Amino acid sequence: MAEYQLSPLAVSDIKDISAVTIETWGKQQARFYLEKLHNTLLMLANNPDLGLQRDEVFSGAKSFLSGKHIIFYRSGPRGIEVARVLHQRMDLHHQFGDERL
């Protein structure tokens, strides 16, 4: 079975998603949302070509929408390497740098 690896920034993104979701909608909704995100990451690890090619973000990048968040990743030797998990309304220029977008 393939797996996913989270970058330090992706770990931070998911912690922020959890905190905001708990604050806004409660612990039960946060558990539900994070479980959905985890299941999406597993699906992508096993099917990395499901995402959209996003070389303008970084070389080899793909993206996939999960709920209100976009998962940015690339294929790795045992699944996927997740770079970021960003809200769909975030400014990608700010998150990835203007030189890549």
Image (tube, rainbow, N blue to C red):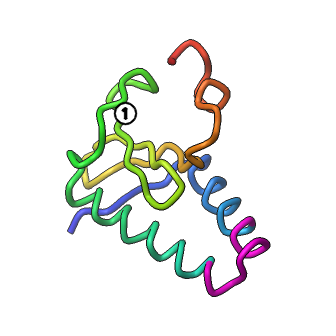
Pick whichever, 39 or 76, lies toward us. Answer: 39
Residue extending farthest to the top is 99
Q: Position of residue 85 (x, y in %)?
A: 54, 50
Residue found farthest to the bottom: 28
Q: Is residue 21 magenta?
A: yes
| Quadrant of the snapshot with the N terminus | bottom left
Instruction: State the residue at coordinates (42%, 52%).
Output: 65
Residue 13 is situated, as x and y percent measured from the top left of the image, at: 63, 53
Q: x%, y% of residue 43?
A: 28, 64
Kindly indicate the quadrant of the structure image that contains residue 56.
Answer: top left
The residue at the point 46 percent across, 26 percent down is 57
Quick check: is 66 in the magenta stretch?
A: no
Give the residues drawn in magenta, as a range.
Answer: 20-29
With respect to residue 77, does 66 lie above or below? below
In this image, 94 relative to 86: left or right?
A: right
Nearer-the-camera pick, 32 or 46: 32
Q: Which amino acid does the dot numbered 1 rest on?
A: Ala
User: Which residue is under mark 1?
Assistant: 61
Seen in the image, is 19 located left or right of residue 98? Answer: right
- Residue 44 in percent (x, y) is at 29, 57
Magenta span main SS? helix
User: Looking at this view, is 9 or 62 the one in front?
Assistant: 62
Q: Residues within 10 Å of mark 1 (few under 14, many from 20)?
A: some
Q: Is residue 96 above or below residue 77?
A: above
Please identify the quarter of the rendering in which residue 25 is found. Answer: bottom right
- Residue 45 or residue 27, whichever sits in front: 27
Give the residue drawn at x 37%, y 33%. 61
Please report the residue visible at 76 percent of the width from the left and 71 percent of the height from the top. Answer: 24
